């Protein structure tokens, strides 16, 4: 089918390139195909190289409305499904402006169509009233002519059908007017909400700043946790070294008090030498152990400082996350509101099309009524002669 054809790799690349054309007719044609026929998923829009940037460029106020409207609808559908560009920045100001201009133009066209349909409904209603007046005289004349009975009956049926169709068309026209009024109110409310939520570039800047701050706070918190873990591992390793050092010294001291069998014979001659060696070893042991204890105290102090900083960093991350989520929620509310307006736009367009269909039925019924009325007049003329 056409969708499969347009989504083939080469064809899709050509269509995306055509969407970025400088000529508004070519670009608008490609964008309408993408928006209304292909309807790509948000992932395809974001993953197609250059497509998201092209759509953002086509939102510019310098572009024609026939280009801005489909580009805005494509982006709005993608953003509503949660798609986000790699840069994280959504062009909400340009998007809202493009949607607002498109809906305003549509409302103007719909008002013109609605007024035109209203004139046609009034004209059809006038025809029915005129027929009703003429129908009374015709029925009165037919009371004395039995041969006219079938023609009068056929005409009466056609007239009733035309009257019913005209009433239905009037109701459809009123319903279309109500739908247009509802859409206009929704459009105004959406614009007001847009101004509160994403009214200017300062809001976009604030959201970007909050998201950047959140990323920074999260990075600092993760670095703090990693640093504390690193210090804890270093402290545990140092504790093991101290324990091993103590164990070696303890073993050496115990060994010095366990002489072999021959040592009793030469104990007197070596007592002075062994005593000097033990004193040197003890000083070396004490010096080394003191250095390790100083290092341990430094690690303990660093761990204390890192541990004390973590709660504040965790609170800063939570605060930045709440602020970013609140701003993002306001942005998402604007997206949902515009989606609702576009949905109502489709409803009002359908109501206008329904009114036009009812008017066509009225015209068909009036044509049938005219045929029966002509036949009835011929019968009356024949009897009069």
Image (spheres, helix red, strand yellow):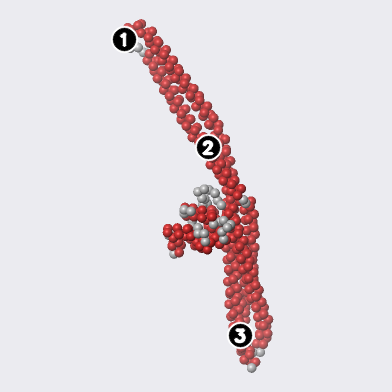
Please state the horizontal and vertical placement of residue 60, each as a whole percent of the image: 57, 56
Q: Is residue 255 left or right of residue 331?
A: left
Q: Residue at x 51, y 50 (%)?
A: 85
Image quadrant occupied by the N terminus: bottom left
Say if 295 sits above or below 266 in the image: below
The answer to which of marks 3 and 2 sits earlier in the sequence is 2
Q: Earlier in the sequence, mark 1 or mark 2?
A: 2
Q: Callout 1: few (<14), some (14-19), or many (20+) C-alpha neighbours within 10 Å?
A: few
How many C-alpha atoms fall within 10 Å of the one at disc 2: few (<14), some, or many (≥20)? Answer: some
Residue 262 circle label: 1
Task: Give the structural element (helix, strand or loop) at label 2.
Answer: helix
First along the sequence among labels 3 and 1:
1
- Asked if marks 1 and 2 touch (Cβ < 8 Å), the reply is no
Q: Position of residue 344 (x, y in %)?
A: 59, 61
Quickly name the residue at label 2: 220
In the rendered image, is residue 330 in sight? no
The part of the image, by quadrant, that contains residue 345 is bottom right
Residue indicated by mark 3: 374
Residue 375's image quarter?
bottom right
User: Dividing the image into 4 quarters, which one contains the C terminus?
Assistant: bottom right
Of all residues, the one furthest to the front in this rendering is 22
Spatial CA span between label 3 and label 2 = 91 Å
Residue sitting at x 50%, y 24% = 297
- Look at the numbered disc 3 and give the secondary structure of its residue: helix
Determine the secondary structure under disc 1. Answer: loop
């Amino acid at each position: 089918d056409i969708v499969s054809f347009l989504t083939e790799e080469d064809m899709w690349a050509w269509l995306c390139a055509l969407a970025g054309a400088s000529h508004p007719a070519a670009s608008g044609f490609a964008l309408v195909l993408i928006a209304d026929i292909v309807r790509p998923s948000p992932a395809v829009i974001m993953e197609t190289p250059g497509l998201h940037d092209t759509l953002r460029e086509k939102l510019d106020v310098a572009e024609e409305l026939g280009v801005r409207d489909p580009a805005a609808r494509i982006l709005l559908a993608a953003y509503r499904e949660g798609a986000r560009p790699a840069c994280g920045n959504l062009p909400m100001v340009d998007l809202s402006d493009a949607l607002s201009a498109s809906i305003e133009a549509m409302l103007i066209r719909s008002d013109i169509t609605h007024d035109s349909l209203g004139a046609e409904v009034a004209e059809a209603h006038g025809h029915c009233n005129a027929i009703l007046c003429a129908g009374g005289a015709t029925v009165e004349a037919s009371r004395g002519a039995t041969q006219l009975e079938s023609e009068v009956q056929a005409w009466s049926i056609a007239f009733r059908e035309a009257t019913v169709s005209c009433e239905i068309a009037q109701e459809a026209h009123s319903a279309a007017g109500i739908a247009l009024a509802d859409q206009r109110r929704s459009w105004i409310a959406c614009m007001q909400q847009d101004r509160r939520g994403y009214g200017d570039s300062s809001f976009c800047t604030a959201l970007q700043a909050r998201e950047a701050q959140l990323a920074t706070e999260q990075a600092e918190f993760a670095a703090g946790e990693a640093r504390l873990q690193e210090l804890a591992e270093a402290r545990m390793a140092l504790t093991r070294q101290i324990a091993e050092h103590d164990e070696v010294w303890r073993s050496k001291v115990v060994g010095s008090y366990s002489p072999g069998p021959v040592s009793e014979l030469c104990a007197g001659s070596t007592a002075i030498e062994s005593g000097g060696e033990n004193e040197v070893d003890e000083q070396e042991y004490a010096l080394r152990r003191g250095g390790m204890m100083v290092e341990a105290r430094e690690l303990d102090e660093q761990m204390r400082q890192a541990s004390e900083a973590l709660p504040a960093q965790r609170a800063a991350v939570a605060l930045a996350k709440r602020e970013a989520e609140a701003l993002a929620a306001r942005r998402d509310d604007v997206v949902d509101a515009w989606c609702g307006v576009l949905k109502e736009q489709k409803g009002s367009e359908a109501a206008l099309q329904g009114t036009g269909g009812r008017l066509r039925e009225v015209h068909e019924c009036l044509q049938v009524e005219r045929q029966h009325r002509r036949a009835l007049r011929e019968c009356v003329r024949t009897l009069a002669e």
